[in-house]
């Protein structure tokens, strides 16, 4: 040890460090005691938040004890959370006061005043802590990052990570509408739980999904893949044809056509879906009225037959999605130098050869990412299909003719209330989509700069 480090080690620690370390340690232990007391209540989100806060407090206490630099940023982050919590609690208090006044109830002024004094003291405490740290600690630049990114990380953990973990745990239970409350005995493997409690079911839901080639999962996945392939292929073909037409100098008024052709993409999806649902109505829809006018006495009831219903939702999705491909392909076409076409003409190439050998290879970097993104969006589409057919028609089979993955998931969760089963469905679907996304990103080279 050098003389400098030895002399610095003999510097007495400020009393404020010990006080702050003890304060955070007491807070962390107190929160853990609160978790132990409330553990039997089953308030999952509250307990998880309390455990996280306890860990942060104890980590801050350890960081202060050893005077680690990262503790500065962690403590500031905790102070920010305290201020946010006080603001939320103050909003709840004001709402309760307003509700009591509207109900004509007498207000407990002493209780309100004591709460306000408590909130004021809690607000002052973080300010005092930050002031002390800024005066007595060297502030590292790296520690300043945590207070800025901390709220974002907290939001990701709360609104993304926690629901995923909760869903995975739910997939191993038999929870449904009639088994809604947890059963401690059943969760531990003892079958002494009342019929209304849900228990740990192991891999039962996953075996129900994947154990039979004729299961709902296999049927819905096959239908969804067929739906995605047909839709994306039509998007690409129609978008390419329209982009080539709009890029041709022989077409007059191209600016007007571009505005008109992009309108389906600009209209809100629910308006387009409802309008097209009226068009395909079997009794008084526009399409059938036109067919009767030209002599077809009994036109099909489009949305009541499996094949025509599937074709109808494909046409509707094509109408609302082709402008995306038309736009990106048109932008790629306009970036191709005209010298390449002139050189191809000089070599005797016809229109098809110029398209195949010049145009398509040069717009490929724009098309492939669009195909990947459109395929993922189309595969998990929900709104359009649900508003037009609600997954039907149902002709004796367990799944509807247009019931793709998101429609099936919604129906199982919010109409049939099979929570454990659909949680397992979501886990399997997440794994499949994640693997497909990684493969497509690698194939399309969208994230080339990240992994190379």
Image (tube, rainbow, N blue to C red):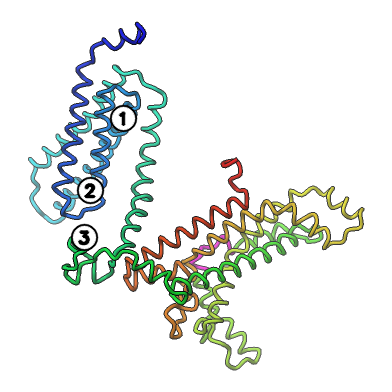
Residue designated by label 3: 188
Say which quadrant the C terminus sits in: top right
Please tell me in which quadrant of the rendered image residue 63 appears. top left
Looking at the rendered structure, which numbered label has been put on residue 208? none
Label 3: which secondary element: loop
Residue at 39%, 68% in the rendered image: 410
Q: Position of residue 401 (x, y in %)?
A: 49, 78
Residue designated by label 2: 47
Label 1: which secondary element: helix
Label 2: which secondary element: helix
Q: Is residue 93 left or right of residue 295?
A: left
Q: Is residue 20 left or right of residue 383?
A: left
Q: Position of residue 53 (x, y in %)?
A: 25, 39
Of the pair 193 and 161, the residue shown nearer to us: 193
What are the residue bounds of the magenta stretch? Answer: 264-272
How many marks can you see?
Answer: 3
Q: How far apart are the alpha carbons under marks 1 and 2?
A: 23 Å
Q: Nearer the viewer, mark 3 or mark 1?
A: 3
Residue designated by label 1: 76
Q: Is residue 402 left or right of residue 11?
A: right
Q: Earlier in the sequence, mark 3 or mark 1?
A: 1
Q: Nearer the viewer, mark 1 or mark 2?
A: 2
Q: Earlier in the sequence, mark 1 or mark 2?
A: 2
Residue at 18%, 34% in the rendered image: 27
């Amino acid at each position: 040890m050098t003389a400098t480090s030895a002399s610095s080690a003999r510097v007495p620690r400020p009393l404020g460090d010990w006080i702050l370390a003890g304060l955070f340690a007491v807070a962390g232990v107190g929160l853990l005691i609160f978790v132990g007391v409330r553990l039997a209540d089953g308030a999952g989100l509250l307990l998880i938040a309390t455990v996280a806060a306890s860990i942060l407090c104890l980590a801050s206490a350890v960081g202060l004890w050893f005077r680690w630099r990262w503790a500065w940023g962690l403590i500031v982050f905790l102070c920010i959370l305290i201020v946010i919590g006080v603001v939320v609690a103050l909003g709840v208090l004001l709402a309760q006061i307003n509700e009591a006044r509207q109900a004509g109830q007498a207000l407990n002024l002493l209780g309100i005043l004591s709460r306000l004094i408590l909130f004021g003291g809690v607000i002052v405490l973080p300010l005092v802590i930050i002031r002390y740290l800024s005066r007595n600690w060297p502030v590292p630049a790296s520690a300043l990052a945590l207070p800025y990114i901390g709220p974002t990380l907290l939001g990701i953990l709360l609104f993304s990570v926690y629901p995923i973990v909760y869903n995975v745990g739910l997939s191993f239970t038999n929870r449904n509408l009639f088994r809604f409350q947890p059963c401690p005995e059943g969760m531990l493997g003892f079958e002494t739980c009342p019929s209304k409690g849900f228990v740990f079911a192991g891999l039962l839901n996953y075996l129900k999904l994947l154990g039979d080639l004729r299961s709902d999962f296999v049927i819905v996945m096959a239908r969804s893949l067929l739906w995605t392939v047909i839709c994306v292929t039509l998007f690409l073909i129609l978008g390419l044809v329209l982009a080539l037409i709009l890029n041709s100098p022989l077409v007059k008024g191209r600016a007007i056509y571009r505005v008109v052709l992009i309108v389906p993409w600009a209209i809100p999806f629910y308006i387009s879906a409802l309008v097209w649902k009226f068009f395909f109505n079997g009794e008084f829809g526009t399409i059938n009225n036109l067919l009767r006018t030209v002599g077809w006495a009994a036109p099909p009831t489009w949305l009541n037959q499996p094949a025509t219903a599937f074709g109808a939702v494909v046409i509707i999705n094509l109408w609302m999605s082709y402008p995306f491909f038309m736009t990106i392909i048109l932008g790629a076409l306009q970036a191709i130098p005209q010298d390449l076409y002139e050189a191809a003409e000089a070599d005797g190439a016809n229109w098809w050869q110029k398209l195949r050998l010049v145009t398509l290879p040069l717009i490929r970097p724009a098309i492939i990412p669009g195909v990947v993104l459109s395929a993922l969006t189309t595969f998990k589409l929900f709104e359009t299909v649900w508003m037009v057919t609600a997954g039907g028609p149902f002709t004796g089979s367990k799944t509807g003719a247009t019931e793709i993955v998101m429609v099936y998931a919604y129906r199982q969760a919010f109409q049939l209330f099979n929570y454990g089963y659909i949680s397992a469905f979501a886990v399997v679907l997440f794994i499949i989509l994640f693997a497909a996304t990684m493969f497509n990103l690698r194939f399309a080279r969208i994230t080339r700069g990240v992994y190379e």
